[in-house]
Image (tube, rainbow, N blue to C red):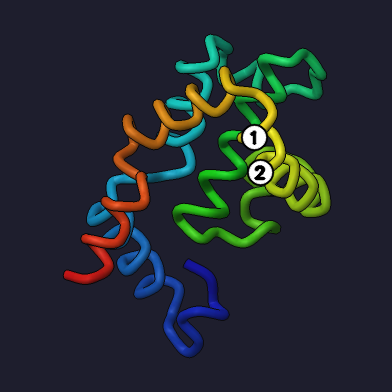
Amino acid sequence: VTPYIFAGLTPSVMYKVSKQYHAMYGTTFKRILETCCELFNVSVKDAMSKSRLHEMICARRAYMAICRNHIGSNYVKIAKTLGKNHATIIHNVRAHNDWMLVYPEYAATYRQIEEKLKLDKKYEQTNVAN
């Protein structure tokens, strides 16, 4: 929840709306990151590091893609959760689409994350319609 979406609301009201949103959809940045790390077999601490190991990159990239594509977070907010620059997030979200086509193991694990978080396309469309 950003002031741009809820212009004119006080911070306390924005906080309540944000809590209701996360309660309704059941997803938070922390939960998404923990799920990505769990399925890619890395610790949250390692995923937050500057490591360039493939497993760490996969976990971070999946996290960024889910935050952007499924819960609609902006690049700056995602960047702040990882201590990165927003340009890094833009690059990784774009690269995610290529990786889904090139790396079948990455794509399979990403789909497991979606399933575990209940974020697949069918789920989103049903909730938006209701």
Element type where label 2 sits in the image: helix
Front residue of 39/73: it is: 39
Q: Residue 91: horizontal and vertical position, in percent? A: 79, 47
Say left or right for 36 vs 115. Answer: right
- For the residue marked with disc 2, what is the amino acid? Asn
Vertical order, 59 against 70 (above or below): above
Q: Residue at x 74, y 41 (%)?
A: 95
- Mark 2–mark 1 Cα distance, whole angstroms, equals 7 Å
Quadrant occupied by the C terminus:
bottom left
Q: Residue 66: horizontal and vertical position, in percent? A: 52, 44
Q: Residue at x 53, y 54 (%)?
A: 69
Circle 2/circle 1 CB separation < 8 Å: yes
Element type where label 1 sits in the image: helix
- For the residue marked with disc 1, what is the amino acid? Leu
**Numbered tag placed on residue 101 in the rendering:** 1
Of all residues, the one furthest to the left in this rendering is 130
**Which residue position holds label 2?**
97
Other-residue count near label 2 (Cα within 10 Å), few / some / many at <14 / 14–19 / ≥20: few
Residue 117 in which image quadrant = top left
